Image: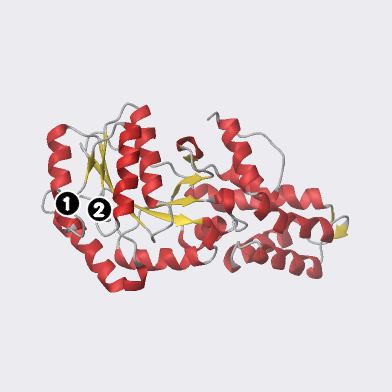
Amino acid sequence: MALGGFFNKLKAGLTRSTEKLTSGITAAFVKRTLDDAALEELEELLLGADLGPAAASDIVENFRKSRFGRSVTDQEIKDALAEEIAKILEPVAKPLIINRSLKPHVILVVGVNGNGKTTTIGKLALQYREEGLRPVLVAGDTFRAAAVEQLQVWGDRTGAPVISGPPNSDAAGLAFDAMTKARADGADVLLIDTAGRLHNKSALMEELAKIIRVMRKQDPTAPHSVLLVLDATTGHNALEQVRVFKEMVDVTGLIVTKLDGSARGGIVVALAEDYGLPVHAVGVGEQAGDLRPFAAMDFARGLVGNVGQSQ
């Protein structure tokens, strides 16, 4: 998909989030002096759009410093808001760079079941193939037959080998064997799917710790990336998921899926403000081309409904 097409899809996907925010701005700021009451109203709108207390407070304070007492229109507020949101997002908009010298660069993919881990792995595999890299996929969620089958479908689609084990087999042993095979075959990237059963947190924590411990017997630096996949439709629950998974593993970056079906796109701003973890990519649909590197200004414009071209 062309970049412009993705930007349009992102804007369309964020429509529900945008309406939540901009309808309030339009109603409140047709032509109004930016006084204390107006700023309080703006903060409430930002909180209602899931931007989170810290980001909402920072944005309002910046408005207070730069525009207090001035007469503003709703469009001026939207333009300024897009810039403020982009400022928060720019430090975390970092693509995931594959280190081709590692052979393989090991990526452990974690997240709650249903957040789109397996699909994200498949989309990444396709992108890596298109870049001339050789990915290998590991069906590490051995408890869910559906996850293994889904990964096999993506393996067939992308031409990437899929390494799996018997149902309920040891995920750590599987990851170790997969590293051995990927290294012998000269693979560039090893993408490891994992279980995400948060209702049994201690067992999941133990399993993830074991996977990492066992892999490090072969490569002390593995995994080289730990990606947490989050579902935008869960809103503030995504913040809690980051907290929990950071307790379990050293999360190195985020991928946010399902922005096309969410009225809670503002959660990406809250994630950036609260955790500062790199947001490597966002997803706006089921197709492989619907997962793209995260662009701060594109997202900020999409969120406030500003019509503009992708930078």
For disc 2, the neighbor class at 10 Å (few under 14, some 14 to 19, many from 20) is: many
Q: Are marks 2 and 1 in contact (CB under 8 Å)?
A: yes
Could you tell me if residue 59 is visible in this image? yes
Please report the residue visible at 69 percent of the width from the left and 52 percent of the height from the top: 18
**Location of residue 75 with respect to 171 vertically, above or below:** above
Quarter of the image for the C terminus: give it.
Answer: top right
Left or right, residue 22 beside residue 72: left
Can you identify the residue that label 1 sits on? 174
Please state the horizontal and vertical placement of residue 125, each as a whole percent of the image: 34, 37
The kind of residue tagged 1 is: Leu
Left or right, residue 27 beside residue 82: right
Left or right, residue 149 beside residue 307: left
The kind of residue tagged 2 is: Gly
Please report the residue visible at 71 percent of the width from the left and 64 percent of the height from the top: 45
Report the disc number at residue 140: 2
SS class, disc 1: helix
